[in-house]
Amino acid sequence: MNRRPRAGSRALTLLDGRVRDITQSGESVIETEQGLMLVRGGLPGEQVRVALTGRSQGVLRGTLREIRSASPERIEPACGLSERCGGCPLMALEPQAQRALKLQRVQRALVEVCEPGLRAVLEPEGQPLHYRRRVRLSFRRVGARALIGYRSAHSHTIVDVEQCPVLEPALQQALLAVRELLAPVLTGSGELELQRGGETGAVVSIDCDAPVSPQTYATAHALAEHCAIAGVSLRVQQGARATYGSLQASSTGIDGQPLHAVADGFSQANSDVNRRLVELVVELAQAADSSVLELYAGHGNFTVALAGAATALCAVEADAQAAAACRANLAARALGNTRVVAGSADELALRGHFDVLVLDPPRAGAPALAALAARHTPERVVYVSCHMTTLGRDLRALHALGFVVDRAHVLDMFPQTAHVEAVVRLVRRTGNTQARVEPPHPAY
């Protein structure tokens, strides 16, 4: 595969280099004579020619112009838009190589905080395509209809998308319905979120940044009656939402019962991998005959499974609607041993000892984790993370308190992307001396 400058393009500095790594956002880290450069499109080990386009936040940026020596793990992408769309930066990399790359990234986060010789376990793969149960899209009116799709990497350009091979079939049908009915009437620009709403179809959330016509409201109402759609919400310029149909998102818990969520709240996007994630959290927590503190509980993805084993459980969630959904999911299962607290995990003044601390924080991690662990003195901490940099930071803070990682698992929650999900257990040790495991090169 070769890429060459377009005829008539302005002269740019061209550099030869080697792809050293892939960042968490899916960009290639290129070693060049002018230093490390971030470029989209290269794969580990490839020799490439890149064009220097500038510097951002102290890092050289560029564009890929030619692959001079391709990786043997490079394959034909399953989507013809993958090179322009910002959604699947690793689609040209063979799936097993994607997973090996993610395993390496998690292993780096464990440096100096794990039992000597510990290796993270790479969990069995799920479906590489047709797995996403929720997706966020952008739109912008251009001419007679709106473009609806994903933004290009580091750009406001919207790549118009009709077919997306990573979407579940139900979401693909919802996308087609949205394009057919909404695209002609949407004005200005904004965002769309599609999420599986259970067996009755997808939930569509529309956020517009400019005033819309009455026809847009009427079309949103009509969209909610489409066979692929369960409900629609429409918000204009941060105002109140107009709602049509059912906005209740739903999945199936590991107990086989429905697990309801807030439509615009957080939930995992890969159902099959999430089931394994929940099983691992329960296994590592060893909650039987234990008191459990769960932080960032959301609508109860882990809570309902942990509550079935724990003696007592306190679940903390900052979003009041998600906390209410968590209570409802517990009540539906008659799990009365759990208290759900709506509040910030970093700010709540909870007191007392808990045997186990479980958390699944956002990408920013849990900066107050060490203080919480010191206050509640758990024997075990189970940490679920989608961001290895903040995971490493928080693990080091716990290690300073005497905790050490004794189990780590890697899950490919988002095939075709560089994102990875890890679940790590730390246990309290005293007087341990950790062997240093050098990473192959720094994390990005």
Image (spheres, rainbow, N blue to C red):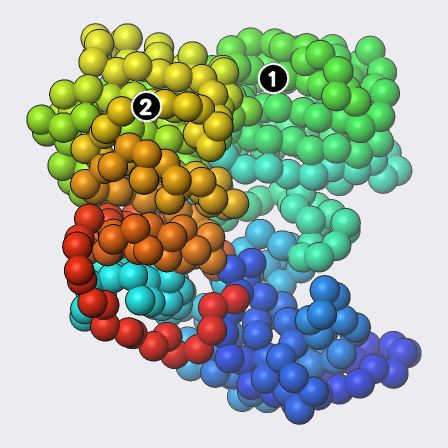
Which label was assigned to residue 272?
Answer: none
User: Where is 140 relative to 95, above or below?
Assistant: above
User: Where is 354 relative to 409, above or below?
Assistant: above
Residue at image x 19%, y 33%?
A: 355
User: Where is 441 relative to 414, above or below?
Assistant: below
* Mark 1 and mark 2 residues within 8 Å of each other at the beta carbon: no
Residue at image x 83%, y 82%?
A: 12
Residue type of the residue flagged with mark 2: Arg
Secondary structure category for the residue under label 2: loop
> Distance of mark 1 from mark 2, alpha carbons?
42 Å
Q: Nearer the viewer, residue 369 or 149?
A: 369
- Number of other residues with Cα within 10 Å of mark 1, as a class: few under 14, some 14 to 19, many 20 or more: many
Secondary structure category for the residue under label 1: strand
- Number of other residues with Cα within 10 Å of mark 2, as a class: few under 14, some 14 to 19, many 20 or more: few
Residue at image x 18%, y 62%?
A: 432
Q: Quadrant of residue 25?
A: bottom right
Residue at image x 17%, y 53%?
A: 429
Q: Mark 1 or mark 2, which has the lower sequence index?
A: 1
Q: Is residue 15 left or right of residue 279?
A: right
Mark closer to the observer (1, 2): 2
Q: Nearer the viewer, residue 122 or 285?
A: 285
Q: Quadrant of residue 323?
A: top left
Q: Quadrant of residue 194?
A: top right
Residue type of the residue flagged with mark 1: Val
Q: Is residue 280 left or right of residue 348?
A: left
Which label was assigned to residue 232?
Answer: 1
Q: Nearer the viewer, residue 20 or 219?
A: 20
The residue where tag 2 is placed is 351
Residue 43 position in % (x across, y down): 51, 75
Residue 127 position in % (x across, y down): 34, 49
User: Where is 251 relative to 398, above or below?
Assistant: above
Q: Quadrant of the N terminus?
A: bottom right
